[in-house]
Amino acid sequence: MSTMSSPVEFLELLAREAAAVEFEGPLVAARAAGLPPDRLAELEQAKSVALRVRALLERRRRRESELSGLYDTVSDLAGLRDLDDVLRAIVHRARHLLGADVAYMTLNDDERGDTYMRVTDGSVSARFQRLRLPMGAGLGGLVAQSGAPYVTANYGEDARFHHTGEIDAGVGEEGLVAILGVPLRLGSTSIGVLYAANRSARPFVREEVALLVSLAAHAAVAIDTARLLTETRSALAELSAANTTIRAHSSSVERAAAAHDRMTALVLRGGGVEDVAAAVTEVLGGALLALDAEGRLLARVGEIEEPDRADIVEAVAASRTEGRSVRRGPLWYAAVVAGAENLGALVLRPDDELVDADQRILERAALVTALLLLFRRTVAEAEGRVRGELLDDLIARPLRDTDALRSRARRLGVDLDAPHVLVAVGDDAIAATGSARQRVLSWATTYASARGGLAAARDGRVVLMLPGLDAGGSARAVARDLSRVTGRPVTAGASGPSNTPAALARTFQEADRCLTALGALGRAGQGASTVELGFVGLLLGTVGDRGEKDVTEFLSATVGPVLDYDARRGTALVKTLEAYFGVGGSLARAAEQLHVHVNTVTQRLERVGQLLGVDWQRPERALEVQLALRLHRLRAPAG
C-alpha cells in the first residue's frame, strides 16, 4: 500500500493546516488504487477523526483569537483616555472576530426619545451612518425592548421587526441582509445595541452571539466608566473651584480686616479724604475718585476720568436707596451720606472683579469719608465763626483795640494792612429758611478763607473781605459763583481797596450803598463797585426803601418820551443827546463823534425838543436830563 493511502497522510494534512476538502484526497487515491473495502473503511474512519481534530483546533484558534480580542478590549478599558477610541476599537474587533462585513453601535438619546448611530466599522453609506431610529423600531428596537439578542438571516423579509421607511432605506443602501444585535446593558437598563451584519445571508452561531454579548458588555462598561470619569472630573473641578472660592474669601476677609484697621487709624490720626482714597486703591487696586455733594473733585488716585454728572446723580441715588455700593459699567459707586444728607460719592474703577467683601471695603470707606467730611465741616464752621466774629468787629463802629484785631487776624493768616476790598451780598441770595442762609454763609466763609479773606453775616447781608485791588471784579466773581450755588441771581456791591483796619467800616458802608444802588438801578443779579457807579451810585445808595420804583418814575418823567420814541422807531435820539452833552453842547463835535452831518444832529435835537418841550436845555432841566441819561445807561447790564 502506498504511504499516500495510509492514515499518516491525514496527520500530515493536520500538521500543515490543510483545508477540509483536501482530506478527501487519500480516500480518492485509495479507491483509484483498488484497495479492499476494509482498508477503505479504515481510511474513512481516519478521515473522520482527522476532521474532528481539525474542527477542534479551529475552534480553539478562534477562541484564542476571541480571548485575545477581549483581552485587548479590557486593556483599552484599563487605560481609557478617549471614549470614542475605545468604542471604535470594540466595534472594529466585533467585525473582525465575527468575520462580518459591517459592525456598528447605536445609543439611546433620552432627551430626544430615540436612538442614534454612535460608531460604524465597514460602512460605506453616509445615509446609514446618519440614521436615527425611533424607540422600538427595527431589529435594534426589539433588542432594546426585550433586553435579549436577536438575529435575522434576511432583515428585509423578517416580519418580527417594526419596519420604517427611513431604517429600511438606510439598511438597503448599505446592502445589509443578515444582522445580529445584542443589547448594551448597565444593570437592568438598556443604553443601546451592538450589531454585526453581513451583506449576504449567513447564520450567526451561538458562539458568535456569546462573543458579541461579551463585547457589548465591555462597551457598556466603557461608556459607564467614561461617565464616571466625567462625573469625577466635574466633582474635582467643583472641589477645585470651591477651594479657590474659599481661598479668595479668606483673602478678601484678610483684606477687609486690614482695610478696617487702616481706616480706623486714619480717623484717629486725623487723616483726610485723600488718605482714605489711597488706602482703598492700595487694598482693592484700580483708581478712585472722591466727589463732594455738588460733584466737585475732593481726591483722585490713579488714572480715572470723571463720569457725567447725570450718571453720578443716578448711581448715587441708587446706592442710597439700596444701602449698598452699585455697579454701572466698569465703575462702582458708593454714596457718602450722613443720615439723610448727601455728602458726596466714592467712584472706583477696580482692576479685578469685586467680591462681596471688597464691596464692604468700599462701603466702609464711604462711611469713613462721611465722618471725615463732617469733622472737616465742624472745624470749618468753628473757624468760620472765629473769622466772622473778627470781620464783624472790624466793620463795627467804633473800632476798638486795633492792635488786638491785627493779632487775631495774623493768627488766621490775614494781614489787615494789605489792600482788601469788601463785597456785600444782597438779600436775593438768602432764601427765607435758616438752612439756606446758613448755606450761603458757609459758602462765603469757604470762598473767602480759600483766598485769605474773611466773611460774616451782618444786618441781613453777607459780607466778604477779600485781598486785592479790583473791587468790581471781586463783586462780579462773587455774584457769578454764588448764583451757581444758590440757583438764583445774586447781587453783589463792592468798595475798596482799604489798607487799614480803621477804613474797613467806611468801606463796608460804601459797598452796602453800592448794593442798594444796584437794586435801585434794576441791576439785580449783577456785581459792581462804587467806583463803577460814580456819583449816581453815591446818590442812589441813599434811596433806601424807595428803590427801583422811584428811579423808574424819574426816568419816565424826565426822558420817557425820548426813550419811547427810540423804542418805537429805532432812532438814535438818546445816543445823540449823550453825545451832545458829552462834548459840552457843540453841534459840530457831536456830529463828528456820531459820524453824521451837523444838520442831522440839529434835526434830532429839534425832535427832542418836540418830545421834551422847548425848555429842555435850560440849566435846571438839562441837569435832570443828563442825570436821567446816566441812570438809563447804568440800568443797562454791565458789559
Image (spheres, rainbow, N blue to C red):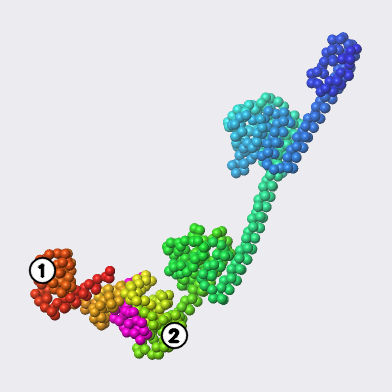
Q: Looking at the rendering, which quadrant does residue 159 occupy?
A: top right
Q: Residue at (70%, 29%) from the top-left corner?
A: 100
Task: Reply yes or no: does residue 544 show up in magenta.
Answer: no
Judging depth in this view, the residue of 108 and 403 nearest the camera is: 403
- Left or right: where 73 falls relative to 372: right
User: Relative to 120, is 545 above or below?
Assistant: below
Report the front residue among 519 and 243. Answer: 519
Q: Which residue is the site of mark 1?
A: 602
Q: Is residue 230 left or right of residue 287?
A: right
Q: In this picture, is 184 found above or below 333? A: above
Q: Could you say which quadrant of the image residue 133 lies in?
A: top right
Q: Position of residue 173 (x, y in %)?
A: 60, 28
Q: Secondary structure at mark 2?
A: helix
The residues bearing labels 2 and 1 have C-alpha atoms spaced at a distance of 65 Å
Looking at the image, is mark 2 or mark 1 earlier in the sequence? 2
Q: Residues within 10 Å of mark 1 (few under 14, many from 20)?
A: some
Measured as percent of width and height from the top left, residue 525 is found at 31, 72
Q: Position of residue 570 (x, y in %)?
A: 17, 64
> Looking at the image, which residue is at 46% across and 62% down?
306
Rendered-image quadrant of the N terminus: top right
**Residue 508 magenta:** yes
Amino acid bearing label 2: Arg
The magenta segment is 487-515
Q: Is residue 68 above or below residue 413?
A: above
Q: Is residue 167 above or below residue 437?
A: above
What residue type is disc 1 on? Thr
Residue drawn at x 49%, y 66% is 300
The circle drawn on residue 408 is 2
> Where's residue 80, x and y in %?
71, 42
| Image quarter (top left, top right, bottom left or bottom right) of the C terminus | bottom left
- Horizontal relation, residue 215 to residue 168: left or right: right
